[in-house]
Protein backbone atom coordinates (compact mmCIF):
# COMPACT_ATOMS: atom_id res chain seq x y z
CA UNK A 1 0.00 0.00 0.00
CA UNK A 2 1.19 3.49 -0.75
CA UNK A 3 1.86 6.22 1.74
CA UNK A 4 -0.73 8.93 2.22
CA UNK A 5 -1.08 12.47 0.94
CA UNK A 6 2.06 14.42 0.02
CA UNK A 7 2.97 17.95 0.97
CA UNK A 8 3.53 19.47 -2.49
CA UNK A 9 0.55 21.53 -3.53
CA UNK A 10 -0.02 22.68 0.04
CA UNK A 11 2.58 25.40 -0.13
CA UNK A 12 4.88 23.91 2.50
CA UNK A 13 7.80 23.45 0.16
CA UNK A 14 8.86 20.04 1.48
CA UNK A 15 8.36 16.62 -0.06
CA UNK A 16 6.96 14.84 2.99
CA UNK A 17 4.12 12.33 2.92
CA UNK A 18 1.75 11.22 5.61
CA UNK A 19 3.06 7.79 6.68
CA UNK A 20 -0.43 6.29 6.98
CA UNK A 21 -1.18 4.14 3.92
CA UNK A 22 -3.82 5.49 1.53
CA UNK A 23 -4.46 8.60 3.64
CA UNK A 24 -6.17 11.22 1.47
CA UNK A 25 -6.08 14.07 3.99
CA UNK A 26 -3.90 16.96 2.76
CA UNK A 27 -0.64 17.42 4.65
CA UNK A 28 -0.58 20.82 6.35
CA UNK A 29 2.25 20.27 8.85
CA UNK A 30 5.75 18.87 8.43
CA UNK A 31 7.44 17.11 11.33
CA UNK A 32 11.19 16.49 11.42
CA UNK A 33 12.38 13.52 13.43
CA UNK A 34 15.60 13.33 15.44
CA UNK A 35 17.23 11.47 12.53
CA UNK A 36 16.22 14.32 10.18
CA UNK A 37 13.38 12.51 8.40
CA UNK A 38 10.60 14.78 7.15
CA UNK A 39 7.14 13.40 7.83
CA UNK A 40 3.77 14.81 6.80
CA UNK A 41 1.01 15.32 9.38
CA UNK A 42 -2.40 16.95 9.78
CA UNK A 43 -3.00 19.67 12.38
CA UNK A 44 -6.65 18.78 12.91
CA UNK A 45 -5.85 15.10 13.42
CA UNK A 46 -3.17 15.87 15.95
CA UNK A 47 -5.64 18.01 17.89
CA UNK A 48 -8.46 15.46 17.66
CA UNK A 49 -6.56 12.30 18.56
CA UNK A 50 -4.17 13.65 21.18
CA UNK A 51 -3.86 16.16 23.98
CA UNK A 52 -0.13 16.69 23.63
CA UNK A 53 0.00 18.76 20.45
CA UNK A 54 -1.20 22.38 20.12
CA UNK A 55 -4.72 22.89 18.77
CA UNK A 56 -5.00 23.42 15.02
CA UNK A 57 -5.94 27.09 15.28
CA UNK A 58 -2.91 27.92 17.43
CA UNK A 59 -0.32 26.39 15.08
CA UNK A 60 1.24 28.90 12.70
CA UNK A 61 1.27 28.39 8.95
CA UNK A 62 5.06 28.43 8.86
CA UNK A 63 6.62 26.33 6.12
CA UNK A 64 9.43 25.26 8.47
CA UNK A 65 9.31 21.70 9.86
CA UNK A 66 8.55 21.15 13.52
CA UNK A 67 11.39 19.29 15.25
CA UNK A 68 10.59 16.29 17.43
CA UNK A 69 12.98 14.36 19.67
CA UNK A 70 11.77 10.93 18.47
CA UNK A 71 13.26 9.06 15.52
CA UNK A 72 11.47 8.65 12.21
CA UNK A 73 10.20 5.14 12.85
CA UNK A 74 8.66 6.19 16.14
CA UNK A 75 7.04 9.32 14.69
CA UNK A 76 5.48 7.36 11.82
CA UNK A 77 4.06 4.76 14.17
CA UNK A 78 2.81 7.50 16.48
CA UNK A 79 0.98 9.23 13.63
CA UNK A 80 -0.82 5.97 12.87
CA UNK A 81 -2.65 6.63 16.13
CA UNK A 82 -3.94 9.97 14.84
CA UNK A 83 -6.12 8.49 12.09
CA UNK A 84 -9.40 6.60 11.97
CA UNK A 85 -7.85 3.21 11.42
CA UNK A 86 -6.48 0.21 13.24
CA UNK A 87 -3.06 0.66 14.74
CA UNK A 88 -0.20 -1.34 13.20
CA UNK A 89 0.48 -4.73 14.77
CA UNK A 90 3.00 -4.20 17.57
CA UNK A 91 4.16 -7.81 17.91
CA UNK A 92 6.85 -7.28 15.27
CA UNK A 93 8.54 -4.51 17.24
CA UNK A 94 11.61 -5.13 19.34
CA UNK A 95 11.47 -4.06 22.98
CA UNK A 96 13.49 -0.87 22.35
CA UNK A 97 11.21 0.31 19.54
CA UNK A 98 8.09 -0.68 21.46
CA UNK A 99 9.19 1.31 24.49
CA UNK A 100 10.14 4.30 22.31
CA UNK A 101 6.64 4.30 20.83
CA UNK A 102 5.04 3.83 24.25
CA UNK A 103 7.02 6.79 25.64
CA UNK A 104 6.01 8.95 22.68
CA UNK A 105 2.37 7.98 23.14
CA UNK A 106 2.53 9.01 26.80
CA UNK A 107 4.45 12.21 26.02
CA UNK A 108 1.99 13.47 23.41
CA UNK A 109 -1.11 11.89 24.99
CA UNK A 110 -2.03 9.90 21.89
CA UNK A 111 -4.49 7.74 23.75
CA UNK A 112 -4.89 4.97 21.20
CA UNK A 113 -1.13 4.46 21.11
CA UNK A 114 -0.90 4.65 24.91
CA UNK A 115 -3.53 1.94 25.32
CA UNK A 116 -2.15 -0.36 22.62
CA UNK A 117 1.44 -0.11 23.87
CA UNK A 118 0.58 -0.53 27.54
CA UNK A 119 -1.47 -3.65 26.79
CA UNK A 120 1.27 -5.13 24.63
CA UNK A 121 3.97 -4.36 27.21
CA UNK A 122 1.72 -5.83 29.90
CA UNK A 123 1.54 -9.06 27.93
CA UNK A 124 5.27 -9.03 27.10
CA UNK A 125 6.22 -8.36 30.72
CA UNK A 126 4.87 -11.79 31.70
CA UNK A 127 7.37 -13.40 29.33
CA UNK A 128 10.47 -11.40 30.23
CA UNK A 129 13.44 -13.45 31.42
CA UNK A 130 16.48 -11.17 31.07
CA UNK A 131 17.43 -8.33 33.36
CA UNK A 132 18.03 -5.75 30.62
CA UNK A 133 14.51 -5.99 29.18
CA UNK A 134 13.01 -6.29 32.66
CA UNK A 135 14.73 -3.06 33.71
CA UNK A 136 13.56 -1.20 30.60
CA UNK A 137 9.95 -2.28 31.18
CA UNK A 138 10.28 -1.48 34.89
CA UNK A 139 11.52 2.05 34.18
CA UNK A 140 8.58 2.61 31.80
CA UNK A 141 6.17 1.27 34.42
CA UNK A 142 7.63 3.46 37.17
CA UNK A 143 7.51 6.55 34.97
CA UNK A 144 3.92 6.17 33.84
CA UNK A 145 2.31 4.29 36.72
CA UNK A 146 1.82 0.79 35.28
CA UNK A 147 2.25 -1.04 38.57
CA UNK A 148 1.20 -4.45 37.24
CA UNK A 149 4.02 -4.31 34.69
CA UNK A 150 6.51 -3.44 37.44
CA UNK A 151 5.26 -6.37 39.54
CA UNK A 152 5.67 -8.77 36.60
CA UNK A 153 9.30 -7.88 35.84
CA UNK A 154 10.64 -7.03 39.31
CA UNK A 155 11.53 -10.67 40.15
CA UNK A 156 13.99 -10.70 37.23
CA UNK A 157 15.87 -7.73 38.64
CA UNK A 158 16.70 -8.96 42.15
CA UNK A 159 20.32 -9.72 41.20
CA UNK A 160 20.98 -6.37 39.53
CA UNK A 161 23.45 -3.91 40.99
CA UNK A 162 21.83 -1.16 43.06
CA UNK A 163 24.01 1.55 41.47
CA UNK A 164 22.83 0.48 38.02
CA UNK A 165 19.19 0.48 39.12
CA UNK A 166 19.51 3.94 40.63
CA UNK A 167 20.92 5.23 37.33
CA UNK A 168 17.91 3.79 35.47
CA UNK A 169 15.44 5.38 37.88
CA UNK A 170 16.81 8.91 38.14
CA UNK A 171 13.96 11.17 39.19
CA UNK A 172 11.89 8.26 40.47
CA UNK A 173 13.23 7.86 43.99
CA UNK A 174 10.02 6.35 45.35
CA UNK A 175 10.22 3.50 42.83
CA UNK A 176 13.93 2.97 43.53
CA UNK A 177 13.45 2.80 47.30
CA UNK A 178 10.50 0.45 46.88
CA UNK A 179 12.63 -1.79 44.66
CA UNK A 180 15.38 -1.80 47.31
CA UNK A 181 12.86 -2.95 49.94
CA UNK A 182 11.46 -5.54 47.56
CA UNK A 183 14.96 -6.86 46.80
CA UNK A 184 15.77 -7.11 50.52
CA UNK A 185 13.34 -10.03 50.79
CA UNK A 186 15.62 -12.04 48.51
CA UNK A 187 18.75 -10.94 50.39
CA UNK A 188 17.17 -12.38 53.53
CA UNK A 189 16.54 -15.63 51.68
CA UNK A 190 20.24 -15.66 50.86
CA UNK A 191 20.96 -15.70 54.58
CA UNK A 192 19.05 -18.98 54.87
CA UNK A 193 21.50 -20.52 52.41
CA UNK A 194 24.61 -19.47 54.32
CA UNK A 195 23.26 -19.81 57.88
CA UNK A 196 20.87 -22.73 58.16
CA UNK A 197 17.72 -21.60 60.04
CA UNK A 198 17.22 -23.06 63.51
CA UNK A 199 13.83 -24.54 62.60
CA UNK A 200 15.58 -26.91 60.18
CA UNK A 201 16.98 -28.84 63.11
CA UNK A 202 13.72 -30.66 63.77
CA UNK A 203 15.54 -33.64 65.25
CA UNK A 204 19.16 -34.26 66.06
CA UNK A 205 21.24 -36.82 64.14
CA UNK A 206 22.24 -39.83 66.13
CA UNK A 207 25.73 -39.98 67.46
CA UNK A 208 28.12 -41.14 64.81
CA UNK A 209 25.87 -40.28 61.81
CA UNK A 210 27.84 -37.97 59.57
CA UNK A 211 25.37 -37.78 56.67
CA UNK A 212 24.03 -34.33 57.62
CA UNK A 213 27.50 -32.79 57.96
CA UNK A 214 28.53 -34.30 54.62
CA UNK A 215 25.35 -33.04 52.97
CA UNK A 216 25.83 -29.49 54.26
CA UNK A 217 29.46 -29.54 53.12
CA UNK A 218 28.43 -30.68 49.63
CA UNK A 219 25.72 -28.00 49.44
CA UNK A 220 28.08 -25.23 50.50
CA UNK A 221 30.68 -26.40 48.01
CA UNK A 222 28.09 -26.06 45.23
CA UNK A 223 26.23 -22.91 46.27
CA UNK A 224 27.73 -19.53 45.30
CA UNK A 225 29.90 -17.87 47.90
CA UNK A 226 28.33 -14.39 47.55
CA UNK A 227 24.92 -12.80 48.09
CA UNK A 228 24.90 -11.73 44.44
CA UNK A 229 25.42 -15.34 43.42
CA UNK A 230 22.50 -16.41 45.58
CA UNK A 231 20.31 -13.69 44.07
CA UNK A 232 21.08 -15.04 40.61
CA UNK A 233 19.76 -18.41 41.75
CA UNK A 234 16.59 -16.69 43.01
CA UNK A 235 16.05 -14.57 39.87
CA UNK A 236 12.49 -14.72 38.67
CA UNK A 237 11.34 -15.74 42.16
CA UNK A 238 11.79 -19.29 40.91
CA UNK A 239 12.87 -22.17 43.13
CA UNK A 240 13.85 -24.39 40.20
CA UNK A 241 17.60 -23.68 40.24
CA UNK A 242 17.87 -24.12 44.00
CA UNK A 243 15.75 -27.25 43.91
CA UNK A 244 18.16 -28.74 41.39
CA UNK A 245 21.06 -28.18 43.78
CA UNK A 246 19.18 -29.63 46.75
CA UNK A 247 18.10 -32.68 44.79
CA UNK A 248 21.54 -33.24 43.27
CA UNK A 249 23.02 -33.76 46.75
CA UNK A 250 20.13 -35.56 48.42
CA UNK A 251 21.77 -38.91 47.68
CA UNK A 252 24.32 -38.06 50.40
CA UNK A 253 21.45 -38.29 52.89
CA UNK A 254 19.39 -41.06 51.35
CA UNK A 255 22.34 -43.42 50.88
CA UNK A 256 24.43 -42.74 53.96
CA UNK A 257 22.09 -41.56 56.74
CA UNK A 258 21.59 -44.24 59.41
CA UNK A 259 19.19 -42.30 61.64
CA UNK A 260 16.58 -40.77 59.29
CA UNK A 261 16.94 -37.48 61.13
CA UNK A 262 19.36 -36.16 58.52
CA UNK A 263 16.89 -36.84 55.70
CA UNK A 264 14.17 -35.02 57.65
CA UNK A 265 16.41 -31.98 58.13
CA UNK A 266 17.35 -31.91 54.46
CA UNK A 267 13.69 -31.98 53.42
CA UNK A 268 12.82 -29.27 55.96
CA UNK A 269 15.63 -26.95 54.81
CA UNK A 270 14.44 -27.22 51.22
CA UNK A 271 10.75 -26.87 52.13
CA UNK A 272 11.32 -23.81 54.32
CA UNK A 273 13.24 -22.02 51.59
CA UNK A 274 10.53 -22.80 49.06
CA UNK A 275 7.84 -21.55 51.45
CA UNK A 276 9.72 -18.31 52.15
CA UNK A 277 10.25 -17.68 48.43
CA UNK A 278 6.56 -18.18 47.70
CA UNK A 279 5.74 -15.78 50.57
CA UNK A 280 7.70 -12.85 49.08
CA UNK A 281 5.51 -9.80 48.51
CA UNK A 282 5.13 -8.13 45.10
CA UNK A 283 7.02 -4.94 44.33
CA UNK A 284 3.85 -2.80 44.51
CA UNK A 285 3.34 -3.65 48.18
CA UNK A 286 6.43 -1.57 48.99
CA UNK A 287 5.25 1.63 47.29
Image (cartoon, helix red, strand yellow):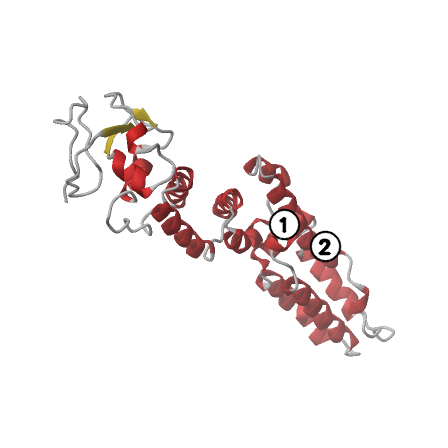
Task: Find residue 286 and report its horizontal and vertical position in percent.
Answer: 65, 52
User: Disc number at residue 188?
Assistant: 2
Q: Residue at x 60, y 52 (%)?
A: 232
Q: Residue furthest left?
A: 9
Residue 177 lies in quadrant: top right
Query: Nearer the N terminus, badge 2 or badge 1?
Result: 2
Task: Determine whether the residue tagged by mark 2 lies in a helix, strand or loop.
Answer: helix
Task: Find residue 15 and report its horizontal and vertical position in percent.
Answer: 17, 26
Q: Are marks 2 and 1 in contact (CB under 8 Å)?
A: no
How far apart are labels 2 and 1 at the CA level? 19 Å
**Residue 43 left/right relative to 150:** left
Q: Nearer the viewer, residue 106 or 230?
A: 106
Residue 122 lies in quadrant: bottom left
Task: Find residue 144 and report its horizontal and vertical position in percent.
Answer: 49, 44
Q: Residue at x 55, y 38 (%)?
A: 168
Task: Determine whether the residue tagged by mark 1 lies in a helix, strand or loop.
Answer: loop
**Residue 13 left/right relative to 258:** left
Q: Residue at x 32, y 33 (%)?
A: 55
User: So how many labels did they put on this image?
Assistant: 2
Q: Is residue 203 above or below residue 276?
A: below
**Residue 260 left/right relative to 86:** right
Q: Quadrant of the N terminus?
A: top left
Q: Nearer the viewer, residue 19 or 98?
A: 19
Residue 56 lies in quadrant: top left
Q: Residue at x 38, y 44 (%)?
A: 98
User: Disc number at residue 287?
Assistant: 1
Task: Find residue 25 and report its horizontal and vertical position in percent.
Answer: 17, 38
Amino acid sequence: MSEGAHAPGNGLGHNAACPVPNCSIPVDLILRSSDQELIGAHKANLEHFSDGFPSADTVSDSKEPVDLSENGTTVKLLLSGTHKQKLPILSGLGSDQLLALAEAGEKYFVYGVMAACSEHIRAESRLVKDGRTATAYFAYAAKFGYVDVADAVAPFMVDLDTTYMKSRLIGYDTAFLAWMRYREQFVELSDALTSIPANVYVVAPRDGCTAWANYVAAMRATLPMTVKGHLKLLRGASFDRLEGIFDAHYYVLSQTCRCRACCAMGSTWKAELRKDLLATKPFSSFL
